[in-house]
Amino acid sequence: MKYRRLAQAGAVGQAEGGPTDEVGPKSIKAATIFSMGRGQCWNRTPPKRKKPRTSFTRLQIAELEKRFHKQKYLASAERASLAKTLKMTDAQ
């Protein structure tokens, strides 16, 4: 499959400077393999970047742990109130 894609891209059959019908690793120029890079694929979309990890202060962590120890699940209003108290967003 890999060689078929290379053939479609025009990279196969040009080793030694002339066209051939051979499709295989010997018919691919080393420069072609090098230019493809590591792990690249023609049909892939660029990888999504991860969101940066949220940093919490020690005070925020202590307060969150204390609150969740008392009550595991919070209603949205309680969550919003706690977030406001700790100067955080609701999603954090």
Image (tube, helix red, strand yellow):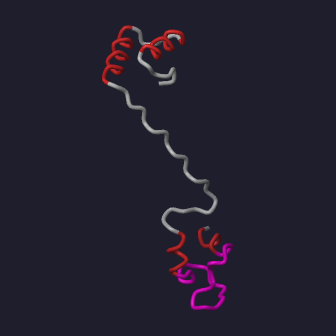
Looking at the figure, which quarter contains the N terminus? bottom right
Q: Is residue 11 magenta?
A: yes
Q: Residue at x 66, y 77 (%)?
A: 10
Q: Quarter-wise, where is residue 70 in the image?
A: top left
Q: Residue at x 34, y 21 (%)?
A: 61
Tell me where residue 15 appears, x and y as whole percent: 58, 87
Q: Is residue 56 magenta?
A: no
Q: Is residue 20 left or right of residue 55?
A: right
Which one is in front, 79 or 86?
86
Q: Is residue 90 above or below residue 28?
A: above
Q: Which residues are magenta?
A: 7-29
Tell me where residue 60 appears, x and y as whole percent: 36, 20
Q: Main secondary structure of the magenta part?
A: loop
Which one is in front, 9 or 64?
64
Q: Residue at x 50, y 62 (%)?
A: 39
Q: Quarter-wise, where is residue 23 in the image?
A: bottom right
